[in-house]
Amino acid sequence: MSRIWTRSFFANSGTECVEAAIKFARGATGRTGIVYCDHAYHGLSYGSLSLTGDKNFRDGFGPLLPDCTSIPFNDLAALEKALVSRQVAAFIVEPIQGKGVNLPDDDFLPAAAALCKRYGTLFVADEIQTGMGRTGRFLAVEHWNVEPDMVLLSKSLSGGHVPVGAVLTRKAIFDKIFDRMDRAVVHGSTFAKNDLAMAAGIATLDVLKTEKLIENAAARGAALLATLSAMVPRYELLKNVRGKGLMIGVEFGPPKSLALKASWSVLETASKGLFCQLITIPLFKDHKILSQVSGHASHTIKLLPSLTITEEDCNWITGAFDSVIESSHRVPGAIWSLGKTLVDNAARKSA
Ligand SMILES: Cc1ncc(COP(=O)(O)O)c(C=O)c1O
């Protein structure tokens, strides 16, 4: 992939990168609109919150930024409808959505980039979670041969040790913002590009390359995906396993058998998505595996293991999942006793 981003703006976090991208897109295009996707997560400061659809994050903090509209992920017709006015400065998208581990259709990102080009909108890839080798390529957009106008990196850019973020942009965009001496400080912050963050970033890039961690993410991720996917036909509560590299979603859903059905609906009535906690808690407590439910009311557990994991670690992860999922199919059993405790807690909270 050619490297077209010859300018980089540094920040201290993911959300600061999003704020910078909004300002750069507006400043460079002279337009105000920003389009984002349903279920997107771009951060929690005012600009980025305005591009984060989840009500749980937004409620109580309005009014948010004007001129921000959402489209369904993977909906090219809706995107074109939003862009056709030629008032939209940027379309911002996570190549793989972190909330839900939602994968794009194969034509979505390339066609979205082409639409942006046609209507003069900047294409911004939020790779804060997917970038730096996470999906088995340095950037996730490389899987679809897309070259965004801006790319946002943070999180693992410093190996997770020092707050840092980077907005990679085309020179033409950067030069429109920082175009005169008196505008040199038109955007920035005190600790952006501090020495420690820059050193940690350079060290991380070096380790990624010398230890071939992106290749490791691709190989280990493919193996994990294959082993976890092979469990789907064996377990009625396990519906789907998806992902790329070491960003994997394990989705659960309603069972068919009567005994499980009753227990599932008690949990779901108490709090939608609660079932996943019956998997994440024993994974952590009994197997020392830290996983995460991938959003409010979600039935998908997200795995984002370290890029350094070995074959042995992968066997540990898949063995642990197998054991926990297997016990979640036993009613009554330890997992459903935990379920009862969670339901009682939820009821106490809402009383
Ligand atoms: C895709 C994406 N964008 C933006 C952010 C916000 O980053 P930060 O928490 O560093 O502000 C996150 C954080 O989880 C993210 O996953």
Image (cartoon, helix red, strand yellow):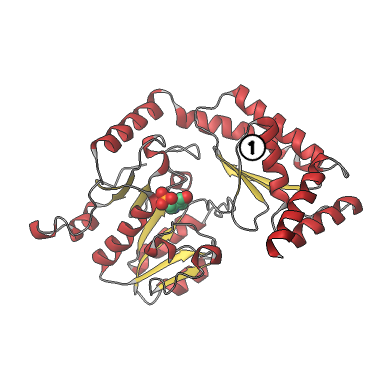
The correct choice, above or below, for 306 with respect to 44 in the image is above
Residue 99 seen anywhere in this rendered image of the structure = yes
Residue that appears at 27% across and 36% down: 198
Farthest residue in the left direction? 181
Near mark 1 (Cα within 10 A), the count class, few <14, some 14-19 or many ≥20, is many
- Residue shown at 45% from the left, 55% from the top: 110
- Asked whether, in this view, residue 228 is left or right of residue 295, the answer is right
Residue 251 pos. (x, y %): 68, 49
Whether disc 1's CB lies below 8 Å from ligand 1 is answered no
Pick out the residue farthest to the right: 258
Residue 311's quadrant in the figure? top right
Q: Which one is nearer the viewer's eye here, 94 or 282?
A: 282
Q: Is residue 330 shown above or below 214?
A: below
Reply above or below: 74 against 293. Answer: below
Q: Is residue 139 left or right of residue 7?
A: right
Pinpoint residue 329: horizontal percent, then vertical percent.
83, 43
Q: Quadrant of the N terminus?
A: top left
What is the number of callouts on the image?
A: 1
Position of residue 222 measured from the top left corner of the image (x, y, whole percent): 60, 34
Could you tell whether 23 is left or right of 40 in the image?
Answer: left
Q: Position of residue 260 (x, y in %)?
A: 86, 50
Q: Name the residue rendered at 65%, 36% in the picture.
A: 284
Q: Which residue is mark 1?
A: 225
Closer-to-camera residue (153/189): 189
Label 1: which secondary element? helix
Q: Nearer the viewer, residue 42 or 112?
A: 42
Residue 99 image-quadrant placement: bottom right
Relative to 289, residue 126 above or below: below
Locate the C terminus by quadrant. Answer: bottom right
The amino acid type, in three-letter code, at marker 1 is Leu
Q: Can residue 72 be seen from the camera position used here?
A: no
